[in-house]
Image (cartoon, rainbow, N blue to C red):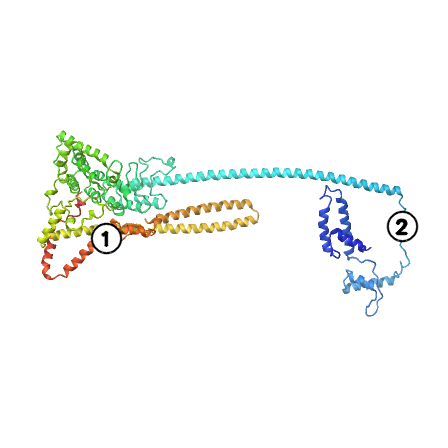
Amino acid sequence: MRPSVSAVSDAYATLGLENGSSLEVVKSTYKQVALRTHPDKNPDNPDATAQFQKVSEAYNVLLKHLDTSTPRGPPRFPGFRFGGDSDDDEYDEYDEYDDYSDDEDEKLHFYMFLFEELMRGRANRYMNMRFRREPVDPETPEQYQARLRRSREEQIAGEERRKQEAAARKAQLEIERERERAAAEGRQKAKVEAKKAQAERQRSKAEAAARNLQQQAQTKRSAVFAAARAGKQDQVKAGVWEDDVDAAGGEMKAGCDAFVKTLPKDPQETLLHIAARNGDKELVEWLDAHGADPEEHDSRGFTAFHVALQSGHIPVVEYFLEQHPPKDSNDIYQRPQDKTLLSLALESHEPELVWKILDNGLATEQDINLSWAWITSTKGRSAMKKGLGGRKGKAQNDEEKFEDIMKLLMRFGGFTPPPTPSSSDNSDGEEWDQILEASQHTHTQTQTPTQQQGAASQAHPPAEDPSLQQKQPQMMGPEAMGVANANLVWDDEKVCRNFLCGTCPHALFTNTKMDLGACPKSHTERLKTDYNAAKEANPSDPIFARFQLEYESNIFSFVDECDRRIRAAHRRLEKTPEENAKTTNLMREIAEIELAIQGGTEKIEQLGEQGKVEESMREMAAIEALKNEKGEKERELQQLTDTSGASGHQKLRVCDVCGAYLSVLDSDRRLADHFGGKMHLGYHELRNMLAKFREEREKAKNAPPSSAPAAAASSSSSSGAPRESRGGDYRPSRGRG
């Protein structure tokens, strides 16, 4: 039976739909409303059951109204005529909604059914049959009330049952939630404990690995130091270059004391100190180019230069003076606390080292006076004789060395040969020792830090003891006391010929980094005036040509020394092939790490999408380790870039006039201060002098032939005269000792 129109409208309203909504919309809406109004979902609402039943009834009404899958009544078939037309509207209506197809097989079966029914005579079997409903006894009022009462009781019982079920369900949910919470807490606690244990294992593993690395590094370092002490140059180079042993610093690394089997006598002694003490110039040069710091001090306050100087290794000292000019590297040559550089040179008993200290301005006048007082005392003479007399068959050379040292001190200090103290006269020896002690006391009391660093000072003999004042002129000569200049003439050996001919270089660089100190020879205007007068009176005298040639030679030697420093500075600013290779390797390693980080990041994203949290956490830890490694490589590359060559991050360049280092980042004002400075202007003046000398020689070449004999005479006499170098430039032959 089809539902009425009003019932269909009420059903649509119950579900909240518009009239005429499709079956699919009705089904979808019913599911939502049924879930929302189900009694289990609304345990506290007593009307939930009635609402749910009302929704169900509305759904059933709409199903009956919209479901056309079965025919509404028994099919009635019209008579078949030729053409197959039918005027039965009811059958047409049924045919419009049936589920039968019109294919030929179904039609054949249908006609076969009709034929069979007709042939068997069953076409009108039930034509006159009537079907009626069986009579039902009417319900009495008592029965009706009883049925209502049972229905209410069943409803009340159902409500109670649902309440109990809801309470039990709620209690069960609470139990399950509590159980899940406890399980989650347990899992979280276990996860935290596992992470702590893993972190502790990783920390212990990292500590063990770090300790192992420290032990390996210290073992390699100790082996390199042992090879250096044994003079095994190849092993030292292999350790520094291949095993990454730092060429700077002492043998024991910080925190690695426990890994050193035999403690060194001097923990601050570096590889450069050992190579300098052994006199291995090649190893010193190699270490200096591979990270060694020439300014490092041992426990005595000695640099590698001090060690080589005291040990008497001339090639090593020459290397330091050439590659690290004193005016540019003052910390290398700064005197130790209890010794002067000149005293270290005297301990080496090598005249050439004494000359190098004096010639490079590394000894103050006070140092020279003290050294002269000591070497001319009984104690000093005996010490020098003892130090020089320990070799068989070389007594003559030793005596010559001692004389050379005495001559150097006399020439640079302006002293005269002292009377030889008698070793049998103890009173004389005590007097010489008193002079030394008093001079040392005066030196300690009056010396300033600037004097300790090599600046020239105008020191005077001690004045506390009148008897010492009387003996100083006898010991040092009248020139050292300033009483003999009145007796000098312009051609005397003690008169500065540079000053007579023009400008003495000692006067150009006062109070600068290149301060040469006071000229050891006399600068007297009276003598210069006498020289110019004599030259004007007799200009053809060969002595003037010889003086001029010597003057030009001295100026050229100063400029040539500056050019040598400039070339050395340019070499220091260049990167070595090893540094270039190391830079390339670091850049390649950083690029590989970046690729690994990129791939790991993509893998983390994939694992996160797949829900694999633990694996993604492990991958993230690996990425963090790669980032740390990349940071270390980048810092190492930056440090290599900053320290490679000698320019560092300052981007230095070398002044082509004076050899000073300039930064490309300097402001115009700072550059102007440099170009207007005394040192730059001094070398500029010396170079102008050389240019002027060349012009004069060119003019002399193009001069008339009448001037040729005079020039030849000048050249002949100059070649026959001994060369006196600047400021007492005395350099003994190495072959003598």
Q: Residue at x 80, y 53 (%)?
A: 7
- Give the camera-side residue of 256 and 317: 317
The total number of labels drawn is: 2
SS assignment at label 2: loop
Image location of residue 452, percent across then percent down: 25, 39
- Residue neighbourhood size for the residue with mark 1, other residues' Cα within 10 Å, grouped as few (<14), some (14–19), many (≥20): some
Image location of residue 70, percent across then percent down: 79, 57
- Give the camera-side residue of 171 and 734: 171
Q: Tell me if label 2 and label 1 are in contact, CB under 8 Å.
A: no
Dot placed on the residue nearer the N-terminal end, 2 or 1? 2
Q: Residue at x 47, y 50 (%)?
A: 596
Q: Is residue 590 left or right of residue 617?
A: left
Farthest residue in the top direction?
427
Task: Say which residue label 1 marks.
Answer: 684
SS assignment at label 1: helix
Q: CA distance from mark 2 to mark 1?
A: 142 Å
Q: Is residue 641 left or right of residue 122?
A: left
Hey, which quadrant is residue 303 in on the image? top left
Quadrant where the N terminus lies? bottom right
- Give the camera-side residue of 103 and 672: 672
Task: Say which residue label 2 marks.
Answer: 134
